[in-house]
Structure formats: structure tokens, C-alpha cells
Amino acid sequence: MRLRQGRLDGKVALITGAAGGQGATEAMLFAEEGAAIVLTDVDAEAGQQVADQIRERGGRATFLRHDVSEIPGWHEAVAAARDLGGLHVLVNNAGIISRHGLTDIPLASWQRTLDVNLTGPMLGMQICAPLMRDSGGGSIVNVSSIAGLTAHYDAAYGASKWALRGLSKIAAMEFVDWKVRVNSIHPGQIVETSFVRDATPGHAESARRTIPMGRQGTPRECADLVLFLASEEASFITGAEIAIDGGFTAGAAIRMRSQMRDELARASASEA
Ligand SMILES: NC(=O)c1ccc[n+]([C@@H]2O[C@H](COP(=O)([O-])OP(=O)(O)OC[C@H]3O[C@@H](n4cnc5c(N)ncnc54)[C@H](O)[C@@H]3O)[C@@H](O)[C@H]2O)c1
């Protein structure tokens, strides 16, 4: 059993894409830690269920159906946060993947991916930051990806996540005098999300084999990192990028090379 520590007592948090996967886990965890939650998603049924669960456990939560690429819903979310007492944490978590390479991506798919993964967080920061300033400051966490740190098979997804990483640093500088910190996180493969569920057969297993830790991450592990960045424990951290990927971006290729070298050495020893 986890003891409640109240790390977000008195805070209001807005989490996008919170109907499932990492966002839902973050909403539940933040509520456990004392925050009132505004959760948004395009999936109204599942989003409402998450809000109901939080309330059943004694927390405060409001769900709004919102496509992050659309401006009016951001103003509605800000109004809902104001009703709960202000805004201290924004988690730009909603994201989509297009599963196209550079040579075959249709323009509409490219633009939709950028609209959701990049323009959505930009609008969120632009529209939410003034209320965060007026609420005494706070923390924005932008959910990028390892695709924002390395090459990726999905051109639009990779471009959007690299741009979000850069935009996070720009925002960190613009908002520093408002006491609003901005950081990006870069998950590797995370189980129990639609990204992994909907992938082609073999995708998850082939990806897992390249992770130095030998396993995928969980939504709870990502939520714990986002909670840390959202809390006062991270009070001197802004403009940072944190990989949460089982060591993948640190040196998966080096590790695979060592394994290959050992295999080749064993093979040549058995031939001799
Ligand atoms: N799952 C992974 O392996 C992985 C790895 C790296 C980064 N990420 C990132 O993590 C974030 C969370 O994704 P997840 O892993 O929980 O996957 P998920 O698909 O389970 O959750 C994403 C949520 O975003 C919502 N959403 C999609 N488009 C939206 C829109 N236009 N407006 C509002 N909500 C929208 C979906 O309905 C869904 O509930 C995403 O930004 C994703 O790019 C995921």
C-alpha cells in the first residue's frame, strides 16, 4: 500500500489525453496526491469514467471533451481550472502517431500529427500560462518521446516530438519570471497504451529486445516522473529533458554491439 504524501495538496492540474494510458494514470496519481484535476480528451466516454473514479475515491475532478488542436476548448479548460481554484500544473500528454515514413506520408496525416502533438501543447502553454502565473507559478510537463531524441520510423511523429522538445526550452525561458517551470519527458516503449496495443505484430517484441533493461516501461513509471516534475521537489528544474526509456537512448547500440561481439566470439570458439 502507498501512503498518501500530499505532494500536490492545494494544487490544480490540467492533464490532456487523460482518458487512458499515461494520462489516466497521471490523473489518478495526482488526485491521490491531493490535486484537483481537470482532465480532457477526445474520448468522452473513457475520460468521464476516469473522472468518476477519481470522485468515487474522494478526489475532485472535472472532465471536458477537448481536441487539443482547437482553441475554444483550451479556454473552457482554463475556466474549469479557475472554478477549482486556479492552475498550477499543465501536462501536455495527448498525442497521436501516424505510422508513415517520409516517403509515403500523406500531407493530411503529417499536418494532423503536428496539429495534435505540437500545436496542441503550444496552444496549451500560451493559453494556460497566464493563469498559472496568477496562481503563484507552477509546472508544465510536455510529453515528448525518445522520437524527440533520436531518428524515428514515423516522420511526422518524430518531427513533432523534436519540435516539442525545443519548444519546451523556449517556454522555460519565456515563463521563468512567472515562476512557471517547463520540462519535457521522453518515454520509450510504454505498455498498456494504445501506442503499443495498436502496433503491428512483432513491433513491441522487436522494440523490447533493443531496450538495455530488457523490458518496456509502465504508465505508472511515467506518472511518477511527471509527478516529480510537477511537485516542489523539482523546484530548481526547468528547461530539462528527461528520458524514461530503460537506457535506450543512452546506448542501446553499444549494448547490442557488445552482445553481438560475444556471440561472434562464441561462434568462432566453437568452430575452432
Ligand atoms: N506509449 C508509448 O510507448 C509512448 C512512447 C513515447 C511517447 N509517448 C507519448 O505519451 C503520450 C501519451 O500517450 P499514451 O502512451 O498514454 O497513449 P494512449 O494512446 O493510450 O493515450 C493518448 C490519449 O490521447 C488522446 N488523444 C488523442 N488525440 C487527441 C486530441 N487531439 N486531443 C485530446 N486528446 C487526444 C487519446 O484519446 C488517448 O486517450 C503521447 O504524447 C505519446 O506520444 C508514448
Image (spheres, rainbow, N blue to C red):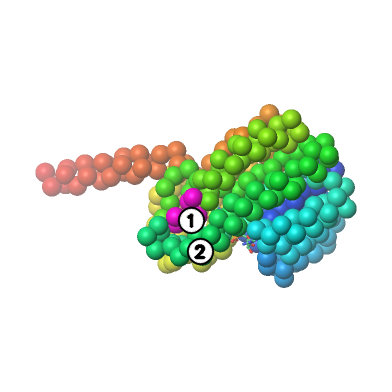
| Magenta extent | 154-159
Task: Pinpoint residue 120: horizontal percent, then vertical percent.
Answer: 64, 54
Q: CA distance from mark 1 to mark 2?
A: 8 Å
Camera sees residue 57: no
The residue where tag 2 is placed is 109
Rendered view: 168 above or below 157:
above
| Residue lying at 85% horizontally and 50% vertically, measured from the top left | 82
Q: Are marks 1 and 2 in contact (CB under 8 Å)?
A: yes
| Residue lying at 66% horizontally and 44% vertically, measured from the top left | 141
Is 121 positioned to the left or the right of 145 in the image?
A: right
**Image label count:** 2
Rendered view: 270 above or below 75:
above
Task: Pinpoint residue 118: horizontal percent, then vertical percent.
Answer: 59, 51
Does the magenta segment cover residue 20?
Answer: no
Residue with the most extreme left position: 272
Pick whichever of labels 1 and 2 is earlier in the sequence.
2
Residue 156 is labelled as: 1
Type of secondary structure dominating the magenta stretch: helix
| Residue lying at 64% horizontally and 50% vertically, measured from the top left | 121
